[in-house]
Amino acid sequence: GIYVCGYEIGPIDYPGYGSIPKYWVNGKAVFLPDASYKHAIATGITVIGSDIYVAGDSSSAHIPLYWKNGKPIAVNSGNVLSDKDLKTAIESNSQFWKYATGLPYTLHGTNHFPNVSVNSVCITGTDIYAVGVVDNITSYRGPVNGTALAVYWKNGTLIPLEDSTNYLQSSVAYVIKVVGTDVYIAGGSGSGSVYWKNGQKFPLNGIVYSISGIAVDGNDIYVSGSGPSTLSNESEVKYWKNGNPVELDDQPTFNQSRTSTGISVINNNVYLSTTALNYLPNGNIINIAKYWVNNTVYNLSNDKSTWDFATGIFVK
């Protein structure tokens, strides 16, 4: 099955909700309403056996949440490893817990960094990894403030991805995937976008607007995101295979903007969750959730929803 998570703003079926998390199973929508969280969003999904886990955020209060089979569970105390269900979900899908700033998890080596941002967390075996950026650096880069350093943490220990003494070049790490002993990370370095394999840096060729996910299939490394369309200046769904951009057939024309928000690759088949912003001739604006299977796109939004966002994908 193909599972896509996301959310809808101003849902007609749920008046009084600013945004409502949802997921789609093979194109069929399932809402996750809860009176306590009327402005929640979903950001990641995974399926283990018959159990469906959805990660999210309460949006207005920024309380990390996840749902297990539709039941919301706030994550607001303790270490991530102490929550068996959450640990299992993160182990199952390296893109399950993204945008994890609020995740209760001890990160060492951050004393000299006033700003620390965690963008993604993954678990493999007994090891937990977090990836992100430290900012306003003093101990690593002398007296210079305002620059940023891409880092990851393994079991809480900070590991820089760049030369920490080169304060003239900022960097950031967004997503991580660990296969065996190999650590794959995608992000930005200086003025370009890159991925790292075990600390060695490789470029993502062409112009990159955004990075949303990373996947490994055999010897191939895939990074999802967006870049400029060759037909217009609009944002287009793209992914990079071993650093080279792959352009999909259905390119946006003017007044459309599309971006990939997650990726899964199985047996050379590429699955992407995407969001498309459209400016209609009558002046209205709609946002449509979609997913791709290789070079074929499928709509997830129906006639009722005008502001749908797809934020992650999992294929089982």
Image: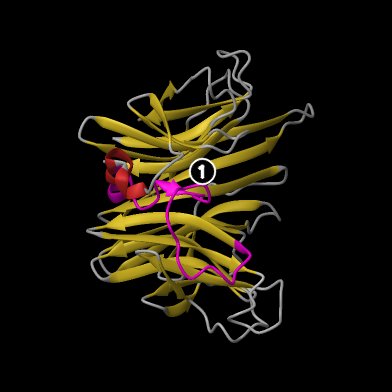
Can residue 96 be found in the magenta stretch?
yes
Q: Which residue shows up at 61% across the image and 86% down it?
A: 166
Residue visible at 69% across and 54% down in the picture: 232
| 3 in relation to 191, above or below | above
217 shown above or below 196: above
Q: Residues within 10 Å of mark 1 (few under 14, many from 20)?
A: many
Q: Which residues are magenta?
A: 89-115
Q: Is residue 5 magenta?
A: no
Choose top left, top right, bottom left or bottom right for residue 169: bottom right
**Camera sees residue 295:** no
Between 241 and 108, the one nearer to me in the picture: 108
Which color mode does the image show?
Answer: secondary structure
Amino acid type of the residue tagged 1 in the rendering: Thr
Quadrant of the image containing the C terminus: top left
Q: Main secondary structure of the magenta part?
A: loop
> Residue 37: image x %, image y %?
54, 25
Residue 225: x %, y % from top left: 52, 56
Residue 27 on image: x %, y %: 40, 28
Name the secondary structure under disc 1.
strand
Quarter of the image with the N terminus is top left
Q: Is residue 173 left or right of residue 180?
A: right
